[in-house]
Image: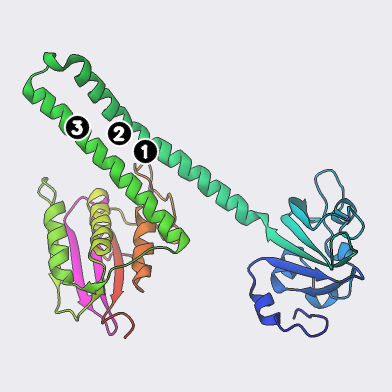
């Protein structure tokens, strides 16, 4: 258990900090270390307290310089108050991001305490990879519709008189379809940003889920003879955001149609505290090894097109309602997607 020196009234909050924190006093020994820092530094918190700060922060850079000698937190420039974040490495090669605050009673006075902040660089690496994946995905998905819009509009502007009215109409319809595709992509990216930042807003009201699902099914019912079958029991009052509910169900049904060969069955049934909706397709199903990943960003099957953000958004929208989403096998064929929405007015 992490130990602090003296009366540390903020100890509980100190332990809850997401980043690692090490506090050293004027004597250059560690006065407090939270669990996150002990984990990052791979040390025992109780043994760290009272040890020299340089021994606890046993970090080196790629050139073999150690953190203590390089940073010189106590005897460096007297004008310093902050050590900028920099990458350092543990003995096993683990990368750690380190910054520090040098506290003085007055400018240029001796350092009275040093507060070191530590972050595992793997989180930054994951964020960097996600940003790179997002940029690559967006660039790829934008290229095709933008090429279509640019090509058809340039052709119409240059050779308007050479085309018949029907040809112009077809070109303009194609431009509109590409513009709609761009709008959907932008909406997906905005949803991802809101989900990631926790800024997703819901406008919930009592809503007829059966009527909504039937409306979505009629809109999406394919022209190739496949029928979307709706099965529903009597459902209790459910409060949802209608637009977000439409987005969730449209995504799930479109996925089922895209990956299945036969009819899609949608079943709505009451649970003790929720309404469950099952979307059952007739495709090849989803391997059990992949089920933990299908709701992550950029997940796609095989050579499937698209951004791979759809199911991530579905999960975010459902969980924002307080519901759940999961996938299971079917006894005959295909995959079964289950989403639940809590019943009753929010806050009851």
Q: Position of residue 299 (x, y in %)?
A: 42, 51
Q: Position of residue 284 (x, y in %)?
A: 30, 53
- What residue is rendered at 68% in x and 76% in y? 15
* Secondary structure type for disc 3: helix
- Kindly identify the residue that appears in the image at 28 percent across and 61 percent down: 248
Q: Are marks 2 and 1 in contact (CB under 8 Å)?
A: yes
Q: Position of residue 44 (x, y in %)?
A: 79, 73
One can see residue 217 in this view? yes
| Residue position for label 2 | 145
Q: Which residue is mark 1?
A: 141
Relative placement, left or right, of 194 versus 128 is left
Which is nearer the eye, 284 or 71? Answer: 71
Q: Say which label, 1 or 3, has the lower sequence index.
A: 1
Q: Is residue 155 above or below residue 201?
A: above
Under circle 1, the secondary element is helix
- Which disc is residue 174 wearing? 3
């Amino acid at each position: 258990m992490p130990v602090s020196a003296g009366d540390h009234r903020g100890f509980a909050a100190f332990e809850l900090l997401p980043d690692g924190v090490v506090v050293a006093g004027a004597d250059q020994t560690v006065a407090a270390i939270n669990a996150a820092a002990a984990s990052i530094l791979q040390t025992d918190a109780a043994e760290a307290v009272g040890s020299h700060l340089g021994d606890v922060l046993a970090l080196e850079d790629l050139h073999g310089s150690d953190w203590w000698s390089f940073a010189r937190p106590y005897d460096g420039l007297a004008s310093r108050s902050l050590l900028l974040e920099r990458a350092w490495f543990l003995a096993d090669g683990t990368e750690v991001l380190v910054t520090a605050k040098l506290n003085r009673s007055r400018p240029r006075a001796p350092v009275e305490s040093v507060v070191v902040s530590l972050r595992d660089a793997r989180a930054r690496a994951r964020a960097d990879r996600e940003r790179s994946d997002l940029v690559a995905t967006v660039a790829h998905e934008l290229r095709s519709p933008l090429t279509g819009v640019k090509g058809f509009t340039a052709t119409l502007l240059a050779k308007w008189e050479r085309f018949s009215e029907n040809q112009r109409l077809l070109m303009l319809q194609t431009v509109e379809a590409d513009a709609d595709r761009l709008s959907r992509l932008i909406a997906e990216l905005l949803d991802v940003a809101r989900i990631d930042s926790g800024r997703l807003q819901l406008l919930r009201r009592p809503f007829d889920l059966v009527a909504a699902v039937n409306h979505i099914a009629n809109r999406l019912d394919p022209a190739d003879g496949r029928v979307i079958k709706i099965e529903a029991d009597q459902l209790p009052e459910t409060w949802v955001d209608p637009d977000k509910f439409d987005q969730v169900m449209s995504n799930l049904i479109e996925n089922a149609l895209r990956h299945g060969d036969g009819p899609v069955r949608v079943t709505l049934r009451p649970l003790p505290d929720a309404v469950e909706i099952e979307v059952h397709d007739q495709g090849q199903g989803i391997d059990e090894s992949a089920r933990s990943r299908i709701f992550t960003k950029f997940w796609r099957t095989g050579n499937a097109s698209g951004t791979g953000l759809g199911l991530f958004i579905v999960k975010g929208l459902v969980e924002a309602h307080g519901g759940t989403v999961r996938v299971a096998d079917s006894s005959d064929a295909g995959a079964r997607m289950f989403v639940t929405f809590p019943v009753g007015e929010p806050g009851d």
